[in-house]
Image: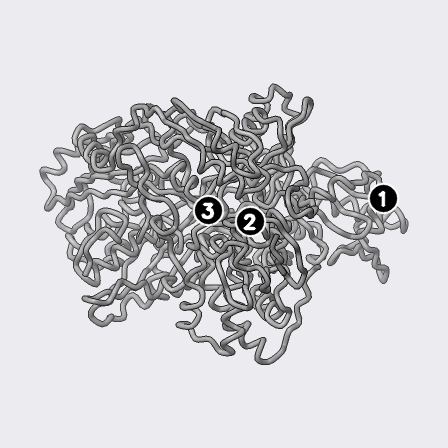
Amino acid sequence: MAAGGLVIAFNVPAGLRKRLAFNADKVLAPNAYLRIGTDDTVSVILSHCELGQGILTSLSMLIAEELDANWESIRAEHAPAALAYYHTIYATQRTGGSTSLVSEYDRYRKAGATARYLLVQAAANRFHVDAKDCRTENGYVIIGDKKIRYGELVEDAAKLRAPEDVPLKEPGNWKFIGQKVKRLDTPVKITGKAIFGMDIQFPSLLTALVARPPLPDAKAKEYDTAAAMAVPGVRQVVVVPSGIAVLGDDFWAAKKGRDALKVQWDAGESAGINSDALLAELKQRADKGGQPATNTGNPDEALQRAAQVVEAEYFAPFLAHAPMEPLNCTVQLSADKCEIWTGTQTQTDDQKAAAEITGLPLDKVLINTVFLGGSFGRRNIARSDFVREGVEVAKASGKLVKTVWTREDDIQGGMYRPAFLHRFRIGLDAAGMPIAWKQVSVGQSVMTGGPFEKVAVVNGVDAFSIEGTHTAPYVKNIADQRIELNTPVWPITIDNWRAVGFSHTIFAMESLTDELAHAAGKDPVAYRRMLLKDAPRLLNVLNLAAAKSGWETPLPAGHGRGVAVFEAMGSFSAVVAEISVSKNVPLKVDRVTCAIDCGLAIHPDGVAAQMESNIAFGLSAALYSEITFKEGKVQQHNFYDYKTLRINEMPKIETFIVDSKEKPGGVGEATVGHMMPALTNAIFAATGKRIRQLPVMNQDIS
Amino acid sequence: MIKLTVNGKTHQLDVPADMPLLWVIRDRLGLTGTKFGCGAAQCGACTVHLDGEAIRSCVVPAVRAADKQVVTIEGLDPALAGPLQQAWTEFDVPQCGYCQSGQIMSAAVLLKHNTQPTDKDIDDAMTGNVCRCGTYQRIRSAIHLAAELKRSGAIKLTLPS
């Protein structure tokens, strides 16, 4: 290290250190997902990454359940990049789509059951009894009055052959699944000990900040490094495909060096991008129509015979993810190895990207996944942008280097949630029910160019652009309908944002449903009951949320309730928001009631935590968030102009989880979308003002 | 050279006049519990105590902390850390966890001055700390509980060192 003469700690996650000390003779490792040590420690190897959603705990619960483990003996660590950890549906190592438990529910239970089988067999062999005469509990095999610690059996069990298949417990015998346990990562996260990517340190590590173009298609025309190199502590300036990297002894040196760097950018076609023009283009495209996603019957004719026609158009802006931990990637590159430390959701893609850049074979690229300081999709992107850049900086500089993004880099160099416009023309019959459905949705395609394009984009329609609209139960049943998608191609980088398509389609659909209810002269909940009469799980959560929120109880003037109910990520949920707003009194969300049927709730308190998180995230976006462009430049910079929800704005949230034995659905993104229309529908109830364009802060609701 | 005392340990450091305390704590002293979130005193992830008061270390030059006492999450007084960490555990507050050091450091100053904070007191003390995971409801509950634990002295939690 530089000045100060101090040697800083070698900050490598405990799990990785443990792996280095791994002694194969002294552990039971019947599969890739767990290891049991002679000290009884059960190490759960996480095929998915922990980014706040709680899988470190819930995947461990699945193993603990079938292993009959002692919860106190469980440790969990992220897996390396390897085939064994591929997502069971996506066939790549990836955390996303709220599918970690969907992917691992069987695999991790079987992993635990296999280990238990071997431990029992080892005990049975040792004491010359039949395995049937052994039982397991809390980290012990029990034979009559003998209790044998798992650790004592590890060496014998490791010599046995693991069976192909093992029976799993009956749900009636579960001790962990469905119960409350303490999150395993709480202790390190409340003491400052948790190691995030940002916290990786080595004695010789340099920090790099990259001067990136204002928009991706701009190129550095001229640059002068002299002033940057003159900053004390700056060691090197290198050109990489994404920009110009300044390497320094520490963040501050690199930051000052980058500030001093003189770059002239030669802007590409994005130089002319303006948000006003983009919105106008979305509208023009909606006029033109697009590729049909559904086209049945004769919706124009049905509109003619409708008792009334409701027209509405909803706009959702570009959004940044703004996870608390800005992006970073540490890379150590040598002639025969590339080692990466970062918080990532896409290990396989990152490994391939690094292999491609360095020319090394895949097995010489090691990915060390550390805790992710949030993501919301930013660390689950198609092109591994920040990992690629980190590897490029290491390659160009020849240094052990951590590439760090500032908050401004994060807000301005985003992979944004695309802006979307959804336009509807709906015909209602005399009873107020929809009989004709015309919809044109317009926005950039998130899946095009990514790994899931072939599955997601069919006949020019990215299913994620209209996610949940064409498959809504009350839409599917309409004989006369046409849903079209128009997909502009713009030089604005976009990618997954928490809840993906649902982050804007639920706003449109559940605002529209409220407008239809109003047109039909029906109460918003009563109307939805009619729409969802053949969708029992949605109907159930709607009724539950309505009852628990006191929907029928009148509110004083200046208060209002809004509801949203939708299926997303394999879960069914309803949200009721209660707000107050009046002249001279700013809008306040007082209370939110959430009912969710996520199938089997493996960790109910984790589900409740995710509902709070979904609601806060959706509310934050609905109230404040937008990325806008002026002359090709993003107008927002940091939390002062990309505002987020704060504690004084947090409503009281109550979550009710439906008792269900259906297969687990996702919860990490299930109600982000719901909160937006629940809020705007509540504002309508309180003020009569219908908000069709987010964020709410731009609208006059006084 | 400045004399910087962090968690009771004194260091002689040669740092640029404008180098924020955050980067001295993290990059020079290797204490990574204090987080970088915004660099503009907007999010509170970098909150530490300077002579007992909560400051945003990402905008305070280290030279301003010379000859003063700096406390980070790693060195928080057990009389405050104990009740806070037990309460945080009780409600399993953290999700991604990145902001939680800052949240706890802000809450510690509140608890030091206020034995029974109201919701309004919590709002006033904690509004500068952003949590993108939205753990605010649990933070609020945990602060109420921590205050109660501090008053009663009923601390049972032992965290791994």
* Residue at 53% in and 32% down: A387
SS for dot 3: loop
Tell me: A146 left or right of A106.
right
The spot of residue A158 in percent (x, y) is 82, 40
Residue found at the very far bottom of the displayed protein: B152
Would you place residue A490 above or below residue A534 in this image? above
Residue at which label 3 appears: A323
Q: CA distance from mark 2 to mark 3?
A: 20 Å
As drawn, the label of residue B43 is none
Residue at the image point whose x is 84% and y is 48% from the top: A153
Which chain's residue wears label 3? A
Query: Which residue is the site of mark 1?
Result: A155
- The nearer-to-camera label among 2 and 1 is 2
Amino acid residing under circle 3: Pro
Position of residue A212 measured from the top left corner of the image (x, y, whole percent):
43, 32
- Farthest front residue in view: B1
Is residue A1 shown above or below A273? below
Instruction: Same chain for labels 2 and 1? Say yes or no.
Output: no
Dot 1 falls on which chain? A
Query: Could you tell whether A318 is left or right of A182 in the image?
Result: left
Residue at 55%, 72% (x, y): give it. B146
Q: State which chain disc 2 sits on.
A: B
Q: State the CA–CA distance, disc 2 to disc 1.
A: 47 Å
Q: Residue furthest top?
A: A359
Q: Nearer the viewer, mark 2 or mark 3?
A: 2
Q: Quadrant of the C terminus of chain B?
A: bottom right
Q: Residue at image x 39%, y 42%?
A: A411
Question: Marks 3 and 1, Cα distance to the nearest angstrom?
Answer: 44 Å
Q: Can the viewer see residue A597 in this picture? A: no
Q: Which residue is mark 2?
A: B23
Going by the numbered disc 1, the residue's amino acid type is: Glu
Which x, y percent locates residue B143? 51, 69
